[in-house]
């Protein structure tokens, strides 16, 4: 079984603005199924496309299965089968041996920036960059599937 152990954080916008970053990658993602116990997501990036199935979160851990699929098929799924959608630019920042994925949301979620880090265990110790702020791992409002139906601008 594939497990994802991930923690999420808000960031200090004023510090993030001054961080030297690699080029970000645009993501368009939509949800075919959004259920409290499972989600099915289609994601299209500039370089690839994926179908992802995620289970219920328990703490920072949940089941995750991700499969690369042809981009044309992913776009068809997004255009014809997704019930909600969002877009963002993702920056991958290497920091003390870990990769922080920082999502700068657009559209109805503009103004929201969330940093995620994948871990090997829930109690793994790691260094946080100075731009990392409040942890929101357990706050369902920050799940991308939730943001696609209840955008940040409505909070």
Image (spheres, rainbow, N blue to C red):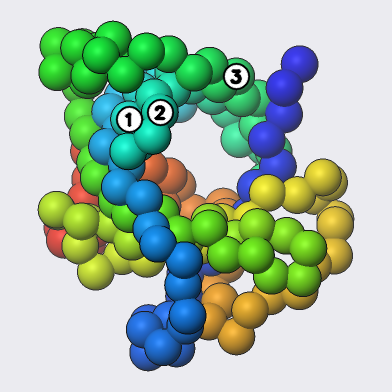
Where 56 falls versus 102 (above or below)? above
Q: Earlier in the sequence, mark 3 or mark 1?
A: 1
Q: Earlier in the sequence, mark 2 or mark 3?
A: 2
**Frontmost residue, 44 versus 38:** 44
What SS does tag 3 mark?
Answer: strand
The x and y percentages for residue 55 are 57, 23
Query: Mark 1, mark 2: which one is toward the viewer?
Result: 2
Quadrant in which the N terminus is drawn: top right
Q: How many marks?
A: 3
The x and y percentages for residue 136 are 52, 61
The x and y percentages for residue 117 are 64, 55
The x and y percentages for residue 84 are 21, 29
Spatial CA distance of label 1 from label 2 is: 6 Å
Residue 114 visible somewhere in the drawing: no
Point 72% across, 29% down: residue: 3
Residue 144 position by quadrant: top left
Q: Image check: 72 left or right of 134? A: left
| Residue picked out by circle 2 | 48
| Residue picked out by circle 3 | 65
Residue 114 position by quadrant: bottom left
Quadrant in which the C terminus is drawn: bottom left
Residue 65 visible somewhere in the drawing: yes
Residue 132 position by quadrant: bottom right
Spatial CA distance of label 3 from label 1 is: 16 Å
| Residue picked out by circle 1 | 44
Point 75% across, 49% down: residue: 119
């Amino acid at each position: 079984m594939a497990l994802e152990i991930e923690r999420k954080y808000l960031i200090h916008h004023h510090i993030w603005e001054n961080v030297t970053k690699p080029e970000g990658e645009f993501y368009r993602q939509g949800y075919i199924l959004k259920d409290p116990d499972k989600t099915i997501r289609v994601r299209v990036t500039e370089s690839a496309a994926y179908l992802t199935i995620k289970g219920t979160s328990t703490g920072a851990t949940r089941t995750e299965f991700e499969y690369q699929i042809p981009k044309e098929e992913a776009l068809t799924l997004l255009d014809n089968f997704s019930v909600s959608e969002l877009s963002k630019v993702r920056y991958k920042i290497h920091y003390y041996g870990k990769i922080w994925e920082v999502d700068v949301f657009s559209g109805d979620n503009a103004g929201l920036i969330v940093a995620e880090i994948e871990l090997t265990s829930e109690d793994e110790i790691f260094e946080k960059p100075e731009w990392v702020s409040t942890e929101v791992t357990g706050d369902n409002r920050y799940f991308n599937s939730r943001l696609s139906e209840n955008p940040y601008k409505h909070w």
